[in-house]
Every structure is written in structure tokens, then in C-alpha cells.
Image (cartoon, coloured by chain):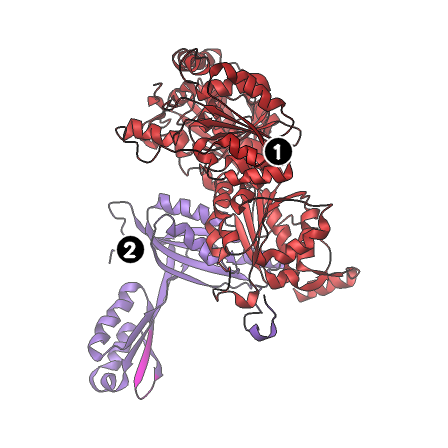
Amino acid sequence: MDTAQEVTNTLTEPKKTTNVSGSVALLEGLIAEGTDTIFGYPGGAIMPIYDALYDYNDKLKHILVRHEQGATHAAQGYARTSGKVGVAFATSGPGATNLVTGLADAQIDSTPMVCITGQVFAHLLGTDAFQETDVINITTPVTKWNYQVTDASEIPAVLAKAFYIARSGRPGPVLIDITKNAQLQMFDYEGYTPCEHIRSYRPKPVVRKEYIEQAAAMINTAKKPFILFGQGVLLGSAEQEFKAFVEKSGIPAAWTIMGAGAIPTDHPLNVGMLGMHGNYGPNVQTNACDVLIAIGMRFDDRVTGRLDKYAKQAKVIHLDIDPAEIDKNVKADVPVWGDCKETLPLLTELIEEKKHTDWLAEFRAYDKIEQDTLIQKELNPTEGEMTMGEVIHQLNVLTKGEAVIVTDVGQHQMVACRYAKFNNSRSNITSGGLGTMGFGLPAAIGAKFGTPDKTVVAVIGDGGFQMTLQELGTIMQTEVNVKILILNNRFLGMVRQWQQLFHEKRYSFVNITSPDFVKLADSYYIAGKRIDERAQLTGALEEMLNHPGSFLLEVMVAQEHNVFPMVPQGMSVAEIRLK
Amino acid sequence: MSNSNEIELNGKQEFTITAYTENRIGILNRIAIIFSRRKINIESLNTSPSEIEHIHRFNILIHETEEVVRKLCRQIEKQVEVLKVYYNTNEDIIWQEMALYKVPTDTIAERAPVERLLREFGARAVVIRKDYTVFETTGHREETDKLIEVLQPYGLIEFVRSARVAIIKDSEGFNRKLREFERREPGEEVIENEFLDKEKNVFTM
């Protein structure tokens, strides 16, 4: 090892060094990684970094959020729309613990994010110093990787590793905790070298040709093949490769909520949404197909329902970049390990061009049943209280499926995922795996910074909005243009629906009162409007969309409306209820 | 104690998981969490430097079904700083545990047939002092357990047993690959906190 180093040293010129602080090295590294926007909140233990940031105003945009949870969700929204790594700053102790929800959300939804936390001086570690918490151990289960820096000279290499780990393979959140002395310490900085390889880390498994061949043979002989696609298609930027595969194979394809938008909603082979509140056809047909081709999805329990009754008749082909996902929930007959951007073209080449006309027609027959018994009434009611569905439907009409829809969690989320049109990739931003109420508003702020040219509409329930509504302050200060559509049913709607259906209508603490949201927005100098009449809907949505800046529109919707279809918990996907 | 070679009715049996990891602060916690979050008990855990500098070898003993163990191993191998994970049944491995027994010297010298004990159990005396004697033996759990039983009447003062260490019978081992790793990409030194005892010399606020 020593000899190798000596050889290198004699062959290369000594590197030029500049004496900089750990904080400056961190900011230089962020710029080198292409970071342009940071979401954060300062505090004592991260003050040297914020001090250095003062001189980097022209290169790094810092968005001051109102709570560190907001910083992580905004960084997630930014990452999910832009395809880049989201970056968040927080101070030690309470600042860092406030990141945990966002980290957990990013971990389960595979969102690339690098969080930097300040930490107390290294010599105070473990002494219960002011604002000290053991951030590394707290965040270990909710990060893909984390590291504590106690010496400034570690910063460039650790940051490079962090970005590489966050964005490569199956992406995820990474946290770097930097002690205050390391932020202040001056050291000889040799410039920033991006990381492209870590010896113990294999982001992509080796693609095995024999499995591709087996999968192709299985697809070619299938009578009723069915594709399930998830976020892996988007994360692998494999939308084109996926479309080519779907179109050549002629196989009906259904999506998980994280995969929405990988092909447009109106694509002729897109047969709808899977899962607990997904469409009728794809859920029922899961238990009728002969070959199930899962692409970049992880068979979440909200998608599979009862596992012992899930697609038992089908051979399963599973394409995933994370070998630990294969066989985790559903046993695969053919495991296709790898990045779907690489594996899909190999598969497409080997499959025969086909049209599964009759099989597709079966899906469309189910569509018709769902349309007639449910969707028609949901989207075009003529009397009674407004439905969430008709609001989303009108929004579709006005935005033509081009908007980025960011949702919070609850009934409105399922309605938005079901009825919003997604013409573009990366246009459905939602908290899929963790189901984080409070995600919507800050994620929408980040989403707008990630894709400034698109209309960003945050669809949020009255419950979730009150979990992070302080981020209205961030909107006020940054003047970011986010359209906030609150669907207010005066209930914690999804919990109420479950209490109605499974707990004998014992409505235990789901009745939630709200402040005057429009006045609240007004106090943050954000324009707003509240409507409760159907006749006002289109006009109000137009007003919101046409308003030059942010706008909060509160729509009073039916109080006790339920989201259907529904696969009740503990039931098979084929037992999906339409009412 | 269950017969370790026998698969019980619920399909659970002893599995020894062997993991090679980078020597990095916190990796033990990352691995332990994979078990604890699934509410799986670790029967024994040994971690120590491998034959290659900067690389550690873990031996983790659990009692589970093969299905669960396979999934656990994939989750462990997924960790950034884990190089390789194997799992094996007891038939696949050679394993040993080491035990130390501390007994009062006078009692043991006066009353016990020490020579016979040592021969029967393959033990040896590590330390002999006026006040106590420490014996050491290695073997499977049942074997080291038996010596406890025998020594108990002679006033066993203290007993300690190591975690299981195991070598896989079949594989050619990871040694060659590890050496290749180290040749191509030398490992990094662990950076420990050098400021912990510097309180008085550091300005803080």
C-alpha cells in the first residue's frame, strides 16, 4: 500500500491546495455536485456553514423553511421533479430530529437526498451538550447511508460519497453530521473529486442474460400477460425504454401511485392504477393473468392486498435494481436483476411484437363497469355536495394533464392519483410508502423550485394542511408560485372512512375544525378564495391557475364521501369493492 | 437447548451468517437494526478483524427459517459498507466457542480430580494464582456447558463464553477475493474522534 502511494506521488505533480474551512469545502463540494438550491434552517451548531453561505449567495440559493421537516419534504419535491439530488440543512439536536420524518419518507420512496446537519463540537460528543442528539444512530434506520465528520479534511471525500450513494442504484437519503469544530477548522483543500465507486457498494447488480431470455420466452408464450410498473421506471429514466417495451409487447400495463406518469394516463395500453384504491380492472385482472411482469415496483402491501391470495395463478417476472426486493413479498419465477434502463431494451429485443386485443378488451369491460357505477357519478355530479373527484376532474380539464400534482395524504390523495391526468413523467409527487400527512405543502414548494416552468398544484386535505401550514411563510418570503387546492371535508377523511366501514361508524377523533384558511393565507400575503357551490368551481380554479403568484383555493366538499373502489384490508385484490 | 442439527416443526433451525464488512464506525448498528426491526433475536454475534486489514468478519448466529435468513442476508448485503454475506446451516460449517472458567484454587486443588477434568474436557489452565485458577476450553455449546456443571460444585466464581466463530466447509473462502480487493483498492483508515480529550484546549460556544 505504501509502495503504491509512493509511486503515485512520484508520477504526479503535487496537488495545488488552498487553505479553507470545512464549511467552505462543503459549499464548494455542493456546487461541484450541481446543487443550486438548498432547503434549510440555521442554528447554533451549523452556524459556520451558514456564515460561509453568506458569501455564496450568487451560486447557491438557500430557501429558509419554517420547520426542518419542511426542508426535507421540499428537498424531496425538488428531487422528484428535477431528477437531481435534493439538499437540506439543519442544525444539531432538535433541528436534526425534525428531519427524521422526511428522511423516512425519502427512504421508503427511494428519493435521492443529502441532508447536512450541524453537530456540537467533537470534544462535547456524548456529554449531553446543549442541542446534542445522537443523530447518526437516530437516522441509521431511515437513511441509505450516514456519516459523522469530526475533521474538516474528511468533508470533500465524504460529501462526494454521499452524493454518489444518494443518486446511484436504488436512490435514497443520506445524512452527513458535521461537528462544529470541523466546520470551522482550516485545512489544505485539494479541490473536489466526485465519487464514482466504493469498493463495498454495488449499486447495480450484474444483468444476467439467461434471466432475460427466460423472461422473454415466458412473455412470448403468455396468453394473458400483465405489466405492473412502479417508480423504478422513473428513477431509472427509462420512460422511453418502457414505452417501447409496452408498445412492442402489446401488454396491458397498470401502475402503482409512485409509477404514475411513466407513460401518459391516456396511453392505449395504460389500464389504470393498482392497489387499495386503484382501478377495478387491474386489481381483478391481477388474479386472472397468466404472466405478471413487475417492473421497478416492490409489491407493497397496499398494492397486493392479501399475499396468499395474490396472483397465485400467474408466473411472476420481477425486474428490479435492488436484489433485496426480489422474492421479498412475492416470489418471482424469473428474477431480472438490474437497472430497467438496461434490462428493458434487452427484453424488448427478444419479445415478439403482439397485440393482446381480447385480453385488453377484458380490462376495458371492467373500465366500463367502474365508469358506469362509480366514476360517472363521482366526476359529473349534478346535485348535492361537491365531490373531490369533480374538483380534480375540472382541474384536469383546465391544466390539460400538464401540471405537476403534489398531494398530501388521505382521501384527496387517492382521488387525485385516480383522476388526475399525468401526461408527463415526474408529474405526480406524493408520499407513497410512508403516507406522511404534512408532506404536500412543503413538497410542492420544492417541486416548483425543481421545475420552475410547470404549474405546480398542491392538492391537500384540511387535516394534512394543518400539519405543515407554517410553510406558507416560506411561500411568502420566497414568492414561489404554488397553487394550493385544499379539499375540505371537515374530517380526517380516510380515517373516518375506515371507522365507518370497519369500526361501526364510531367516529373517534376524526372531526377536525379548521381556521379560516383564506384569512390565514391573507395574513401571509397569499391570495385565496373559498367556495362551496358547484357553480363556482370552474371559475375559481381558473382564477387560481391564472393568478400570477401563489393562490390558496379552499373547496368545501362532501363531508362523508368515501373513496371507492376499495380492497378492504385482509382481502384479495380480486375482492375489490365498487361501493 | 434444541438439537442444533434438527429442523424443528416450525421450520426454524440454527443458521450462521457470515458477513464481510468495511471496518467502519456504525456498521454494527446498521446490521443489528436489520434483526431488531424484524424482532429477530441474535443468539450470538462475533465481530473481529479479518485476515485483511480494514475488513471485518461478522459471525451471527440466529434461529430462523431459511426463507427469513435469505431475506435478512440480502438486506445486510445491501448496506453500503458490506462486501459479502453468506448463510450456512450447522452441517455446512466448522464452529467453536471459547469458554473461560474461574474457580478458587484451594478448592479445586484440594477436592477436584483436576487432571481428569482437564483431560476429559480438553481444557487447560490459563492462570494459576493463590486465590483462583482460570481454565479455558473450546468446543460446541454442549461441551462447554458440561464443564460448567462439573465445576459448579467446586465454587465456580466466574464464567464467560465467546460468540460462535465458524468456518464454512465447502467454500474456498473469501480470502483470495479479499486479498485481491485489498491489492486493487486499499481500505480506508477509520477516522476516530481525536478531540474527545481536548476539552480544555478548545474554545466553544
Q: Colour of chain B?
A: purple
Residue A340 spot, x, y in % from top left: 56, 33
Q: Which residues are magenta?
A: B128-136
| Res. A75 in view | yes
Image location (x, y in percent) of residue A563: 39, 23
Indicate the secondary structure of the residue bearing disc 1: helix
Q: Residue furthest right?
A: A13
The chain whose colour is red is: A
Looking at the rendered structure, whether the residues under marks 1 and 2 are on a common chain is answered as: no
Secondary structure at numbered mark 2: loop
Q: Amino acid at mark 2?
A: Ser
Name the kind of residue labelled 1 in the image: Lys
Subunit of label 2: B
Tag 1 subunit: A
Numbered label attached to residue A448 = 1
Disc 1 and disc 2 in contact, CB within 8 angstroms? no
Where does label 2 land, which residue? B4
- The location of residue A415, given as percent across then percent down, is 45, 24
